[in-house]
Image (cartoon, rainbow, N blue to C red):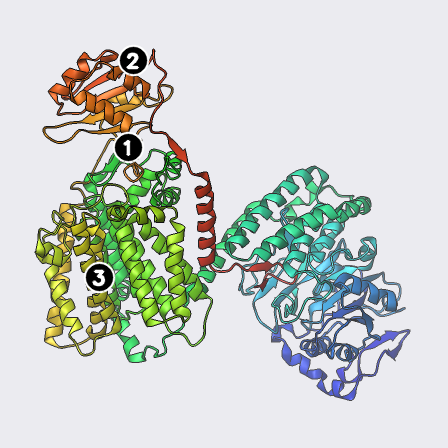
């Protein structure tokens, strides 16, 4: 073996001929290369074929392409020194580097004069230029690695190296050994590990799917434990360390010049497979790769186009230029669908440039026509049918799985980054942080230790199971209904129509569109109603935990606060009374608080996440404005006053004002209706105003925030209020305790006003209870570890009250006024008459005693949710009112014809029936008595002689619907984290990400 201090020598005709004299400093530093590798990589001195094959002589020409590689070339130089089997010729190509790359290339052992090319020259073109300038190594007349017979067959090889890779000492030897053992394989690739000497795997061969996704079969961060050490045939290998037989290189004309950097290796391997050459991987040959381009440590050379766009374009080109012709139509359709989905992802991720890159790559590749010319040029290579090597491609299901995994990990990562908050100016001390760590004996079982350390998990599981137990009387067929909850729509289509359709001059409620969005993921409107009402307690607790974890350190206090908040939905009567709006508000309020907390916290620097939180705050306010207008108005006023008084026109103040304005804009035109008709502020989503929920006739119920007729007595709230009073009187009280009391007092004031105005006090009373819970939770967090007897007694009182309320919840359940039954209280034949083709309109008239006559026009399964808010104006219902007034006075005989002219098919009187009105209807011409059950009565209207037209016709607000969809899309996209573009570079699995 040649001494490292004498330089690289080639032996020809029995005498040594030195190719180059190295600088003295390089000779003295050469042995350092041996220390760079693991002990297992030290050469063993193998000089014969272990399989006993006939000797063969390998002549290797190595080509190193460098671009701005001064940071890595010294290590490559050491690696070349340490090689046991060295190449016969070393060619170096510099692609317009501006650093010391050219000098370092010239200092490599045995290198030929450096070939300089333009910075825009791609890797494959640079290799070809180097070979044209210098040529392959000359064939010596004697001596090969397996003998010294001058008549041995000679095989010429081309070894491709990047400037940021370092072959292990035995890398070339193992590649040539496999070339000897498998002479039918014309391309060999090494195992790639992470630079500088990491055990992390990058590639052991590479393939692609027909959709253009690069696949190595290796997970990110996977360590090399020999699990991939099988010599096998693959579709392609990386160009870093690729060993190519000369005849294969010349037959394929090298790398495609249309692929300057990305996908050139896959295209080369695919062409080789079609031409009948095999591609193999030799895992014993190890090359360490820094992936400088992949990790963004240096700018990409060879192109001025965006890296992501270039990668996608080359992926399309590679598939279109090589795939069988019969698959091209399906592949183009697949590319189109994939581009649409990825573009939508980028738009949702607020990276429109990524969507532009997607379409530019697809259209530019397909329309440019380069791939069609490539197909013509490659026809001579089509010697092997596609079916013979299609098993080497990645299956589409694997590509789909990888896409889903990457999407999930990207979403979770970006969400963590988006909502990661900076620490307070006064960071939490280690002593305070220690309060959140539960001490558990090590001899306890693991599951028990985990439960003790996670009290909220235990509490939430209890609440989730309790919600199922409490709903035991509400499980079955039918829909949830109550005096305060109209039946949900039957289908998503009906709900979508109701969200944008109303009589002329009437605005449909804004919450219907938001409820439709929820219904799309809960299997319909009925499913959404079940989730919101029956799951309100655990869902509200989970939302409260998300808020409390931002400033409550003690885990037990945090768990109690979240659980108590969830149970407050039950004590407020929102579930048992079917108050859909309050249940939604209970879930949204903590999320709104967490977003406001993110906006309002003081930071040393301004971060983009605060604007995302401001957008999310506006969305939460829009939900409150829609479902509980009174609570939404109160919260908006508090935010405006707090923003201007606390922050002025600084960043936080501007963001909070923006959030309030955004919330009002997102519910347009419902906002205009609230301004024109202030009485609608008392309405909750789902039913009539909740005036009966929080009347002012009981001072005890009003002050404790417990509605009259609620599921729990008012005195159960007294311990909570007393502890909150004790907490606020402490000298060491914290600002969050004051905020809790401020919320409670604001809810109390709003309740007093609403109870006098006639409705809307239910959600305001819930805000009062939530404020007390917040004050107690923060106080518990500050004194929870205290050993004082009075503190322990007070906390014990709170826990006992909470357990008693839990018992009420489990025993009483969620039923009450809320019940499950059919969607309509009509006879079966009347309900069936509303279906096609009859589509009957039914006038339901209610008159009992001295109460005024009430009516409703039932069509298409109504009335349903939102019907009260979208009820017609009095002048629109006047024709029906006039007919009923005439009937109340005994009738004139023309009412039957008038009802037919109003396109009414049936008149129905539910029990108890007014005998006078029933007698009048029996005597009218044009009305025929229909069947009756359970004391009710109905009449069929003869419409054969009159062409009727309904006086109440719904109009669809298409413009508002389109504007609303656009506004919500903008708001949702703005509060989402920014998407990243992932570039699948040829060197390994780690992707280069560009913001």
- Residue, disc 3: 746
From this view, report whether residue 452 is shown above or below residue 708. Answer: below
Mark 2 crowdedness (10 Å alpha carbons): few <14, some 14-19, many ≥20 = some
Seen from the viewer's position, the closer of residues 364 and 117 is 364
The answer to whether mark 2 and mark 1 are in CB contact below 8 A is: no
Q: Quadrant of residue 890?
A: top left
- Quadrant of image for the C terminus: bottom right
Label 2 or label 1, whichever lies nearer to me, is 2
Seen from the viewer's position, the closer of residues 840 and 558 is 840
Cα gap from disc 2 to disc 3, whole angstroms: 58 Å
The answer to whether mark 2 and mark 3 are in CB contact below 8 A is: no
Q: Is residue 10 left or right of residue 455?
A: right
Residue 234 in sight in this render: no
Upstream in sequence: badge 2 or badge 3: 3
| Residue 466 position within the rendered picture, expressed as x and y whole percent measured from the top left | 21, 50
Seen from the viewer's position, the closer of residues 623 and 661 is 661
Residue found at x 13% / y 73%: 791
| Residue 126 position within the rendered picture, expressed as x and y whole percent measured from the top left | 79, 65
Residue found at x 22% / y 70%: 737
Dot 1: what SS?
Answer: loop
- Residue, disc 1: 863
Cα gap from disc 2 to disc 1, whole angstroms: 24 Å
Upstream in sequence: badge 1 or badge 3: 3
Upstream in sequence: badge 2 or badge 1: 1
Label 1 or label 3, whichever lies nearer to me, is 3
Residue found at x 53% / y 53%: 347
- Residue, disc 2: 942
């Amino acid at each position: 073996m040649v001494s490292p201090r004498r330089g690289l020598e080639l032996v020809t005709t029995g005498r040594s001929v030195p190719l180059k004299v190295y600088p003295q400093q390089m000779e003295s530093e050469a042995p350092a290369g041996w220390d760079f590798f693991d002990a297992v990589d030290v050469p063993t001195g193998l000089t014969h074929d272990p399989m006993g094959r006939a000797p063969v002589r390998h002549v290797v020409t190595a080509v190193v392409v460098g671009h701005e590689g001064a940071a890595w070339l010294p290590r490559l130089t050491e690696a070349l020194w340490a090689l046991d089997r060295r190449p016969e010729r070393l060619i170096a190509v510099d692609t317009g580097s501006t650093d010391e790359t050219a000098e370092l290339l010239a200092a490599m052992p045995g290198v030929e004069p450096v070939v300089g090319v333009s910075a825009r020259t791609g890797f494959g073109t640079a290799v070809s230029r180097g070979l044209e300038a210098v040529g392959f190594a000359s064939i010596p007349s004697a001596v090969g690695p397996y003998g010294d017979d001058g008549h041995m067959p000679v095989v010429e090889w081309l070894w491709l190296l990047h400037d940021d890779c370092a072959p292990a000492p035995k890398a070339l030897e193992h590649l040539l050994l496999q070339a000897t053992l498998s002479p039918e394989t014309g391309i060999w690739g090494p195992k790639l590990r992470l630079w500088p000497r990491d055990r992390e795997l990058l590639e052991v061969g590479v393939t692609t799917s027909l959709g253009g996704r690069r696949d190595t079969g290796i997970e990110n961060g996977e360590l090399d434990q020999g699990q991939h050490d099988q010599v096998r045939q693959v579709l392609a290998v990386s160009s870093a360390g690729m060993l190519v037989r000369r005849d294969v290189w010349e037959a394929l004309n090298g790398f495609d010049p249309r692929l300057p950097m990305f996908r050139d290796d896959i295209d080369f391997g695919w062409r080789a497979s079609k031409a009948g050459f095999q591609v193999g991987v030799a895992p014993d040959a190890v090359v360490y790769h820094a992936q400088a381009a992949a990790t963004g440590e240096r700018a990409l050379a060879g192109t001025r186009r965006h890296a992501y766009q270039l990668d996608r374009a080359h992926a399309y080109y590679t598939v279109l230029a090589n795939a069988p012709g019969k698959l091209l139509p399906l592949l183009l359709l697949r590319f189109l669908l994939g581009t649409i989905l990825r573009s939508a992802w980028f738009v949702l991720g607020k990276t429109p440039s990524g969507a532009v890159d997607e379409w530019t790559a697809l259209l530019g590749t397909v329309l440019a026509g380069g791939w069609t010319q490539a197909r013509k040029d490659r026809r001579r290579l089509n010697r092997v049918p596609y079916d013979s090597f299609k098993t080497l491609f990645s299956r589409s299901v694997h590509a789909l799985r990888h896409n889903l995994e990457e999407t999930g990990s990207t979403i979770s990562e970006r969400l963590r980054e988006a909502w990661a908050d900076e620490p307070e100016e006064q960071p939490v001390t280690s002593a305070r942080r220690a309060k959140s760590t539960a001490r558990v004996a090590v001899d306890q079982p693991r599951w028990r230790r985990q439960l003790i350390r996670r009290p909220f998990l235990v509490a939430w599981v209890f609440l989730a199971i309790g919600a199922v137990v409490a709903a035991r009387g509400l499980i079955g067929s039918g829909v949830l209904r109550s005096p305060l909850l109209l039946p949900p729509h039957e289908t998503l289509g009906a709900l979508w129509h109701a969200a944008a359709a109303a009589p002329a001059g009437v605005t449909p409620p804004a919450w219907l569109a938001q409820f439709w969005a929820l219904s799309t993921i809960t299997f319909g409107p009925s499913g959404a109603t079940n989730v919101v009402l029956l799951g309100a307690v655990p869902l509200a607790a989970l939302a409260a935990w998300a808020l409390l974890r931002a400033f409550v350190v003690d885990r037990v206090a945090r768990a109690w606060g979240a659980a108590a908040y969830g149970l407050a939905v039950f004590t407020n009567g929102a579930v048992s009374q079917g108050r859909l709006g309050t249940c939604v508000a209970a879930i949204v309020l903590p999320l709104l608080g967490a977003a406001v907390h993110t906006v309002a916290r003081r930071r040393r620097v301004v971060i983009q996440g605060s604007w995302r939180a401001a957008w999310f705050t506006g969305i939460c306010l829009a939900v409150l404005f829609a479902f509980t207008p009174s609570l939404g108005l109160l919260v908006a006023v508090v935010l405006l006053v707090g923003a201007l008084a606390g922050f002025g026109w600084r960043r936080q103040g501007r963001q909070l004002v923006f959030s309030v304005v955004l919330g009002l804009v997102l519910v347009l035109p419902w906002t205009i209706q609230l301004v024109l008709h202030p009485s609608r502020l008392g309405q909750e989503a789902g039913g009539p105003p909740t005036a009966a929920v929080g009347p002012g006739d009981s001072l005890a119920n009003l002050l404790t925030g417990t509605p009259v007729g609620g599921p729990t007595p008012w005195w159960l709230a007294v311990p909570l209020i007393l502890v909150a009073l004790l907490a606020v009187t402490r000298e060491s009280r914290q600002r969050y305790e004051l905020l809790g009391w401020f919320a409670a007092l604001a809810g109390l004031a709003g309740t007093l006003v609403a109870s006098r105005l006639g409705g809307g006090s239910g959600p305001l009373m819930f805000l009062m209870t939530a404020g007390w819970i917040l004050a107690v939770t923060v106080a518990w967090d500050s004194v929870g570890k205290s050993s004082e007897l009075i503190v322990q007694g007070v906390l014990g009182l709170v826990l006992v009250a909470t357990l008693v309320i839990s018992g009420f919840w489990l025993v009483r359940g969620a039923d009450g006024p809320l019940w499950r039954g059919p969607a309509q209280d009509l006879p079966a034949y009347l309900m069936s008459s509303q279906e096609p083709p009859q589509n009957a309109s039914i006038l339901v008239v209610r008159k009992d005693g001295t109460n005024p006559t009430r009516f409703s026009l039932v069509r298409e399964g109504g009335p349903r949710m939102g019907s009260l808010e979208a009820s017609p104006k009095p002048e629109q219902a006047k024709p029906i009112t006039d007919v009923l007034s005439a009937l109340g006075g005994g009738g004139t005989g023309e009412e039957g014809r008038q009802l037919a002219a109003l396109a009414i098919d049936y008149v129905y009187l539910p029990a108890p029936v007014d005998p006078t009105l029933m007698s009048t209807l029996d005597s009218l011409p044009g009305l025929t008595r229909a069947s009756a059950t359970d004391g009710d009565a109905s009449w069929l209207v003869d419409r054969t002689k009159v062409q009727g037209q309904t006086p109440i016709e719904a109009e669809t607000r298409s413009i508002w619907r389109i504007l609303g969809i656009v506004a919500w899309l903008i708001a949702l996209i703005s509060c989402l984290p920014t998407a990243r573009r992932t570039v699948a570079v040829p060197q390994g699995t780690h992707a280069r990400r560009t913001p």
